[in-house]
Amino acid sequence: MNTTQLECFMEVANFLNFSRAAERLQITQPAVSHQISTLEDELGVKLFHRTSKSVRLTPEGIMFTQYAGEILKLSQLSKARIKEPPQSAPPRLIIGCRNPTELRFLTPALERLRQTQPEVLPVLRMIPFDSLESLLAEGDIHMMFSFREAASTKNRYRELTRCPAVCICARSHPLASRSVLTVKDLREGGRIATCRPRVYPPSLFALQSRAMGNRETSQVLFCDNLEVLLPLVVSGYAFAVTADIPHSRLPDLCYIPVPEMEPLSFGAVYTAEGYTPLVRQFLRILSEVSSPLLGE
C-alpha cells in the first residue's frame, strides 16, 4: 500500500467515476484502475462495485475511506514538517560548580544573563573539583570557579573578587557576639568543623589548621565537603573557618571576620579554546555583579 493507491482510491470514492478521478489526478484512466485493483488485492476485499453504468462503494470501501483519509493527512503533514527549516538549538552556557556556595554566588549573574540574553540556556553541573577540571579540559563545561591558589596554570584565570577569611557559626554560638576574631579566639572557641585540604585553597587550609590548635579529637569534626560541614555549623554543633564568597551567605549563620589572613583571589577558570563570545560576555556580567567589582 502506498500513497498513490490511496490518492486514487479517495478520488474515485469522491467522484464515483474513474475517468473524472483520472482527470483530477492528471493520469490515465487505466492507471487509476490498476492502482485500485492492486490496492484491493493487497487488502483482500473489493472496495467498489463496478458496472458499465455505475461505480459505488462497497461496505468495506465506505469503512476504508476513513482510514485512507487519515493516512493521507498524516503523510502530507509529515512531508510539510520535514521541509520546514530545522529550529536551531538555543545557545548553552555550561558552568561547573563544586558546592552550593558557588551556586549561590552565580545567582545574581544568572539573573542578569536572563535579562540581557534570554535566548541563552544556562546548564549548571555540581560535581567534585577534580572531575570539573577534567570536564573543562575536555570541553564538556565552559567554565568553573576556583581560588587562584588552587587553579591550574594550564587554564586561564579571571579574578572576580577577593574573599576575606571568616568564622561562620550559628547565631546561638558563643562566638556569634564577636565583631572580629583572632586565631587565638578560634582556638578557644569550642568545637570546630574542618574540611580536607582539597576542598580549601592552601592558605585557607593553613588558617583552619592554626585555628584547630591542639584540640582533642572530640573537639574536631572532620568533613569531606562543605555540604557536610554547613549543617553541622547551622545546627550549632561547631564553628568553621571559610572564605566569604559574595552572594553566598546563609541567613541562619553569623559571618565574623578573621583579618589575620589576606583576602583570597576568587575567580572563573576557563580554557583558551573555550573563550567564546558567550563566555566573554558572561565573565563581564560576573565581574559586574561581584563585590568588590574588579572589572575587566
Image (cartoon, grey):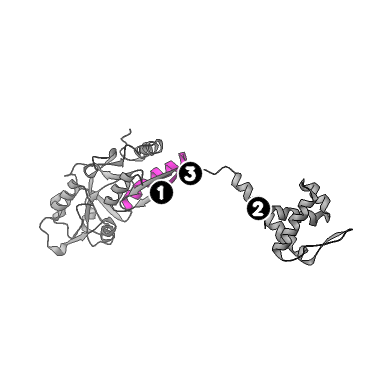
Is residue 214 among what the camera can see?
Answer: yes
Residue at 42 percent of width and 46 percent of height = 122
Is residue 109 in the magenta section?
Answer: yes
Instruction: Classify 10 Å Cα crowding around label 3: few (below 14), some (14-19), many (20 and above).
Output: few
Residue at 35 percent of width and 50 percent of height = 103
Label 1 – label 3 distance at C-alpha: 12 Å
Specify which label sits upstream in the sequence, 1 or 3. 3
Nearer the observer: mark 2 or 1; the answer is 2
Q: Which numbered marker is on residue 97? A: none
Determine whether, in the image, residue 189 is placed left or right of residue 96: left
Specify which label sits upstream in the sequence, 2 or 1. 2
On the image, which quarter does residue 60 sit in? bottom right
Residue 104's spot in the image, x, y percent? 35, 49
Q: Quadrant of the N terminus?
A: bottom right
Q: Which numbered marker is on residue 75? A: 2
On the image, which quarter does residue 239 sit in? bottom left
Q: Which residue is denoted by mark 3 in the rendering?
A: 90
Q: Regarding mark 1 in the picture, which secondary structure is present there?
A: strand
Q: Which residue is denoted by mark 1 in the rendering?
A: 123
What is the three-letter code of the residue carrying label 3? Pro
Magenta region, residue range: 100-122
Nearer the observer: mark 2 or 3; the answer is 2
Residue 73's spot in the image, x, y percent? 68, 53
Specify which label sits upstream in the sequence, 2 or 3. 2
For the view shown, which residue lies furthest in the right direction? 53
What is the three-letter code of the residue carrying label 2? Ser
Residue 245's spot in the image, x, y percent? 29, 46
What is the three-letter code of the residue carrying label 1? Val
